[in-house]
Amino acid sequence: MIEQGLPGARADVRGDDGVHFEATVVCEAFRGKLPLARHRLVYATLGERMGGEIHALSLKTLTPEEAA
């Protein structure tokens, strides 16, 4: 869902119980944005699933250069 919502993004999502997740998202769209703005971009791709199907999401958001 994240990769579909953020063109060019790479997302590695893990969650053992199906409601709590950890994600590392690498995307050029994060360039020049503060962490809160980056997280909002990811949350927007998930829509109403946040707080419902997805109870908790821990995010690490990076530009391609930061991930290298």
Image: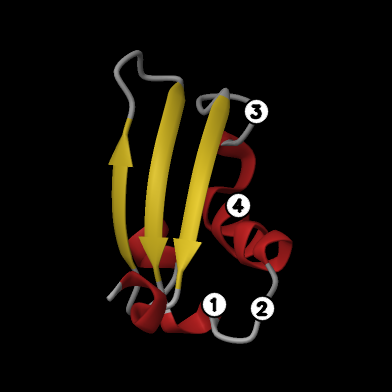
Which residue is pictured at 63% across the width and 40% down the height?
48
Counting labels gives 4
Quadrant of the frame with the C terminus: bottom left
Check disc 1 and report the residue beneath it.
30
* CA separation in Å, label 2 and label 1: 5 Å
SS type, badge 1? helix
Around disc 4, counting alpha carbons within 10 Å, would you say few (fewer than 14), some (14 to 19), or many (20 or more)? some
Query: Given contact means CB atoms under 8 Å apart, are the residues at marks 1 and 3 in contact?
Result: no
Q: Earlier in the sequence, mark 3 or mark 4?
A: 4
> Can residue 48 be seen in this snapshot?
yes
- Res 58 label: none
Sequence-wise first label, 4 or 2 = 2
- Which residue is depicted at the point 32% across and 42% down? 13
Amino acid residing under circle 3: Gly
Residue 60: image x %, image y %? 48, 53
Task: Give the secondary structure at mark 3.
Answer: loop
29 left or right of 48 in image: left
Which residue has dot 3 on it? 51
Given the image, on which type of amino acid does mark 4 rest?
Tyr
Please determine whether, in this image, residue 58 is positioned above or below residue 4.
Answer: above
Tell me which amino acid carries mark 1: Phe
Q: For the residues marked 1 and 4, what is the alpha-carbon distance in whole angstroms?
A: 13 Å
Q: Residues within 10 Å of mark 3 (few under 14, many from 20)?
A: few
Name which quarter of the figure residue 22 lies in.
Answer: top left
For residue 43, which numbered disc appears in the image? 4
Label 2 and label 3: CA atoms lie apart by 24 Å
